[in-house]
Amino acid sequence: MFNALVVDKDEDGKTHAGVRQLELEDLPGAEVTVAVEYSTVNYKDGLCIGPGGGLVRHYPHVPGIDFAGTVEDSSDARYRPGDKVVLTGWRVGEAHWGGYAQKARVRADWLVPLPEGLDTRQAMAVGTAGLTSMLSVMALEDHGLAPGHGPVLVTGAAGGVGSVAVALLASLGHEVAAVTGRPEQGPYLRDLGASRIVAREELTEVTRKPLESEMWAGCIDAVAGAMLGRVLKQVKYGGSVAAVGLAGGAAIEGALITPFILRGVNLLGIDSVMQPFANRLRAWERIARDLPLDKLEAMVQPATLSDLPQLGADILKGQVKGRVVVDVNA
Ligand SMILES: NC(=O)c1ccc[n+]([C@@H]2O[C@H](COP(=O)([O-])OP(=O)(O)OC[C@H]3O[C@@H](n4cnc5c(N)ncnc54)[C@H](OP(=O)(O)O)[C@@H]3O)[C@@H](O)[C@H]2O)c1
């Protein structure tokens, strides 16, 4: 028997989440059984713990879109008992049972061996959010961003993607400007390496101007909505924006073609879910090398399985700071 956070749906279509005991036979069939050590809380987890958001197909469901742990049993030659592994994406925790349990059974293709220099707790302090930040940094670098080009803007900065992005960019030598709607998080963002705090309100007004003054060498955007529409008009000639999330809305409000055709600005789409294995491995290895672990620790808020229903509701309201690390065995 092992503990899991199980979400069920009642006859009225309402979901209920609670910690329950399951048996190994309850797990879905796949090649690798993992003794989960840590998981975390992402926006999608908030949806899957609560209303579902169209992501969960079948109930009862075990959410948790990412986890790290130790292989217990494997019928795939790539993994052996005792191997440390990390999993993000592939619709685990949505269409497949996920990491909010002491055991998970998943396909070998979905796993990544934990890189040298990171333990399972640190891997989940990074989690899907941090992996996505690293993928964004890599995309910006591939499109020419280098330290010294000017300030790099991070939106939704006090959230999970934003916090890791600020710490990564600063440790790589970039000047970082952090956009937040929570002014009280200014000192936290400065500790992570931001040299400037930008109030959210400065970027939420939709304007019809074709372009604004060139300010940012690049941007990692977790917000979209009106903010992305404004930021695109402020990016320096030839600069790029990595579009990661939609915390502020799914549209790009007020966006015009002008930044693309008059300044050669690039809008780079970042997806962590279906990212090919080789790029995942490269991103995890870069995280182990480039993310300062003391900064990572400063982002962490510890939690247990029974804290998850509340944390799921909090992240949907944009009220979670930094990274939650869920010890599934606590
Ligand atoms: N592309 C991918 O593969 C991928 C992977 C992971 C996450 N995501 C997406 O990226 C986004 C961020 O994820 P996360 O885990 O970092 O979530 P999070 O921890 O909730 O952070 C989102 C942050 O956005 C800001 N925000 C929230 N509501 C806002 C609003 N209405 N207007 C402007 N800013 C707002 C807040 O930051 P401040 O309080 O600092 O303003 C909040 O902390 C989500 O949309 C998520 O779905 C995408």
Image (cartoon, rainbow, N blue to C red):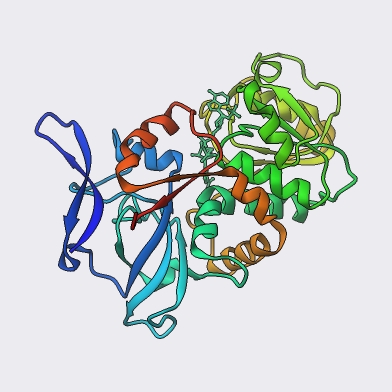
Q: Who is closer to the viewer here, 18 or 44?
A: 18
Q: On screen, 155 above or below 68?
A: above
Q: Is residue 211 left or right of residue 301?
A: right
Say which of 203 and 192 sits in front. Answer: 192
Q: Position of residue 268 (x, y in %)?
A: 66, 45
Which sits in the foreground, 137 or 166?
A: 166
In the picture, residue 97 is in which quadrant?
Answer: bottom left
- Quadrant of res 117: bottom right
Residue 269, position in %: x, y? 61, 45
Residue 264 image offset from top left, x and y in percent: 81, 39
Q: Quadrant of the C terminus?
A: bottom left
- Number of numbered discs: 0
Residue in view at x 60 percent, y 23 percent:
182
Of the pair 18 and 148, the residue shown nearer to us: 18
Outermost residue toward the left in this view: 11
Q: Is residue 291 visible?
A: yes
Left or right: residue 241 compared with residue 306: right
Q: Residue lying furthest bottom in this view?
A: 77
Residue displayed at 37% across by 31% down: 313
Q: Considering only vertical position in the picture, is 222 above or below 184?
A: below
Depicted 320 relative to depicted 142: above or below: above
Looking at the image, in which quadrant does ligand 1 appear? top right
- For the question of whether residue 48 can be seen, the reply is no
Q: Residue furthest front?
A: 330
Q: Quadrant of residue 27?
A: bottom left
Left or right: 57 as drawn, with respect to 170: left
